[in-house]
């Protein structure tokens, strides 16, 4: 039997998040859950890893990642205009219009699995980051800590470092929802026999049944030489149970 794998559970919660995958020029898209490149960039900022440190970026990218969507976000759009932009020929100025998409009101549980020593460093780093942390854009800062602290008296967060497999953490971790109304509503649904599920996206082998390609595995973050490889993920669902809803005992009416 193989040794129990170490995992790091993170809470990704912000009023606005952006996880671009195919952003080009005047259209900036967002995925509906955190991307591998986005999470690696977040962790690199926490550790203080420079853009041109491709070896450290590669180590972070090799961690297996799973995402549980604890609250689906709403895709919104920012309409930007930038005036007095020099033309490519340098003979005048123009106005550029761009559309930038983002997720509003989303909450995710992100679990990383791999080298225990690296995960231990990351656990400490996300609590005391070298550089500020943000979710896709500098204005999109966390609404609560990525991991829970013993001194934290605010909204619940992720448990951080645990000696469990990634799939076990995704299935058992307490729900990160903090809306009392929604907590009670979902408990009532479950107690009345309704099946409630949370969407998941988990790194997998390319030959796994249902595997889908995602071109967001970072190879280089160097300015002017940003490169990405393809990884495989398995989309799925996990049941939302009363065991992972830590909301007291709301009554159905």
Image (tube, grey):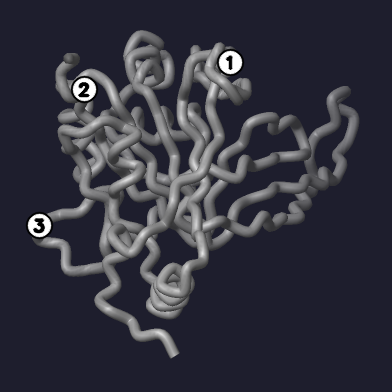
Please, which residue is most extreme toward the top here? 55
Furthest-left residue in view? 150
Task: Give the CA separation, mark 2 to mark 1.
Answer: 23 Å
**First of labels 2, 1 by sequence position:** 2
Q: Which quadrant is home to the N terminus? A: top left
- Say which residue label 1 marks: 230
Q: Is residue 32 above or below residue 230?
A: below
Residue located 39% across and 54% down the image: 142
CA distance for labels 3 and 2: 22 Å
Tell us which disc is closer to us: 2 or 1. 1
According to the picture, the residue beneath numbered tag 2 turns out to be 118
The span from disc 1 to disc 3 (Cα, nearest Å) is: 38 Å
The picture places residue 100, in percent across and down from the top left corner, at 70, 47
Mark with earlier residue (1, 3): 3
Tell me which label, 3 or 2, sits earlier in the chain. Answer: 2
Disc number for residue 71: none
The residue carrying mark 3 is 150
């Amino acid at each position: 039997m193989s040794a129990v794998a170490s995992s790091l559970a993170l809470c990704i919660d912000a009023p606005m998040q952006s996880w671009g995958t195919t952003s080009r020029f005047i259209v900036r898209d967002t995925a509906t859950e955190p991307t591998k490149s986005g999470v690696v960039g977040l962790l690199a900022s926490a550790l203080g890893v420079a853009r041109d440190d491709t070896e450290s970026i590669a180590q972070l990218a090799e961690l297996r990642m799973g995402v549980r969507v604890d609250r689906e976000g709403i895709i919104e759009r920012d309409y930007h205009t930038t005036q007095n932009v020099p033309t490519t020929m340098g003979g005048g100025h123009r106005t550029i219009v761009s559309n930038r998409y983002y997720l509003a009101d989303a909450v995710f549980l992100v679990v990383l699995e791999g080298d225990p020593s690296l995960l231990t460093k990351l656990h400490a780093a996300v609590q005391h980051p070298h550089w500020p942390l943000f979710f896709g854009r500098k204005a999109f800062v966390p609404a609560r800590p990525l991991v829970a602290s013993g001194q934290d008296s605010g909204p619940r967060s992720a448990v951080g470092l645990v000696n469990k497999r990634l799939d076990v953490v995704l299935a058992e971790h307490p729900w990160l929802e903090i809306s009392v109304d929604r907590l009670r509503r979902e408990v009532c649904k479950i107690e009345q026999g309704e099946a409630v599920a949370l969407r998941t996206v988990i790194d997998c082998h390319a030959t796994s049944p249902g595997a889908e390609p995602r071109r967001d595995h970072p190879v280089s973050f160097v300015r002017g030489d940003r490169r990405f490889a393809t990884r495989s993920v398995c989309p799925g669902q996990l049941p939302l149970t009363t065991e992972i809803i830590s909301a007291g005992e709301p009554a159905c009416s």
